[in-house]
Image (tube, rainbow, N blue to C red):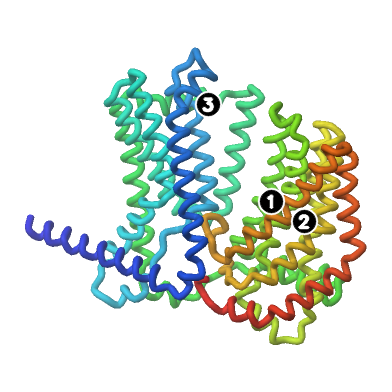
Amino acid sequence: MSNTNTLKTKTNRMFKKFTALQWKSFFRSSNLGKSLGIKILMGFFGVYMLLSLAGMGTGMYFILKKILPNQSPMWSISQYLIYWVLIELFLRYFMQKLPVMDIKPFLTTPVKKSTIAHYILGRSAASIYNLLTFFFVVPFAIVLIFQGYQVLNVLLWVVAVMALVLCINYVNLLINKNEKVLIGLVSILLIGYGLDYFGIFSVKELFAPIFHALYAYPITVMIPIALAIGIYYINYQFLKDKIYLDASLKVKSVEANTTDLAWTKRFGEMGSFLQLDLKMIWRNKRTKSQVFISLLFVFYGLVFYTQDIYSSMVPMKAFVGVFMTGIFLSNFGQFIPAWDSSYYSMMMSQNIPMRKYLESKATLITVSVVVMFLLTIPYVYFGWDALAINFGCALYNLGVNIPVILYFGSFNKKRIELDQSPFGNMQGTSATQFLIMLPVLAVPIILFSIFYYLINLQAAVIVLSVLGLLGFAMKNYLLNLITEQYKRKKYGMIAGFKEKGS
């Protein structure tokens, strides 16, 4: 018994030591001051989100009661829990960072690998993403109790839901690097929703009794708890087997890809930069995710075009047009040239024409805008106005927003590590990324709104189109100005990109 207590005491001490070291690492970072403003801003955003979820959880009972008056709110929410599980897994794949710590210094000290593994998994359980569900479920449960639901059943239901959250959390750690699983998740989600939406087969009704049983039969709380413990143990064994010093020395075996993108050579000097960008996008998780996310946002317009409330809000359709056709422009373009930060100083030390470098970026973004516009053509189903708005917005993105976003790129001085997760990751982000959204999104919407309300829809679309065509006509002049700007900022960017962890 005394040996067990001694072991627990030592483990607790090590956990406290790890936590203290992580805390010191955060506050002693040389980049803390530079990123403090963004951290505070994200902190406020996080608090706002938690409070919003708490408010949503409080009102969800009454919302469900109003929408489905003949159905118990607990049954209603049980129908959609299967979609919640799939959507949360999908979002966490992109958003949740894997729990990491610098374990190499501990591998030569008498610290047990099991202790390190437990600490890493424990930190993961304390993730902000697990709190999101908690802040929604608890207020919802409180309202249920006040509405006469069984207290014990409700409390154990909350425990069961939080156990499911931990299951999702630890499953994500196992699948996070597997793109096949991501494709499978998206496929299951879309197929399931499609079957429900078109009335072919009710996925909701199939899973509703299973999730409702977590409330109706309190003993079933043991099932998600057992699942969470089991998945935790699998993660523990996986981590424990990977924690050894040779892991950092072992050469990683990667399957070679022989695609040489020879077709890019037809673009001359610019071709080598295009080839470099395409390879970078395909080989790195963060850049590849930008492509997948951009393609998914083709469906963003359905949120507005299928809702009657937005039918009279025509400027919102212009916002959708700018956003859909320019989503890659915004996501990828706002971090130019930070994507190349790991080798930017090497590139700038060579006899590389800056104009061709920027022209290659512009060409890549131009292709993305054209492709995104072609993918939005089916919105003509909602009327020719939708197609006209998207066309005008695409021209504006091509002629105006591409030079704007390239110009603002000259102010980027923060390094980006390409193997990092794309979401929930503020690496490379500065005030520039927030400011750039004003001219890229706000200006075209304001212009569109002014001419739409003063004249008509056709005039508003023509204004955006003409501005885009003028941008095309002045392309060489604008690129020359932007090139000179990059040359002036060259050494500042090189110095900024050398600072790791910025």
Using the image, determine if residue 39 lies above or below residue 144: below
Residue 294 is tagged as 1
Q: x, y percentage for residue 323?
A: 72, 48
The residue under the point 25% across, 63% down is 16
Q: x, y percentage for residue 459?
A: 90, 42
Of 42 and 197, nearer the camera is: 42
From the viewer's perspective, tell me whether residue 397 is left or right of residue 41: right
Q: Quadrant of residue 476?
A: bottom right
The residue under the point 32% across, 24% down is 217
Circle 3 packing at 10 Å, graded few (<14), some (14-19), many (20+), is many
Residue indicated by mark 3: 204
- Whichever of callouts 1 and 3 sits on the residue coming sooner in the sequence is 3
Of 8 and 344, nearer the camera is: 344
From the viewer's perspective, tell me whether residue 330 is left or right of residue 26: right
Circle 2 packing at 10 Å, graded few (<14), some (14-19), many (20+), is many
| Cα–Cα span, label 1 and label 3 | 29 Å
Using the image, determine if residue 240 lies above or below residue 216: below
The residue under the point 85% across, 47% down is 392
- What kind of residue is marked 3? Lys
- What kind of residue is marked 1? Ser
Disc 2 + disc 3, Cβ < 8 Å: no
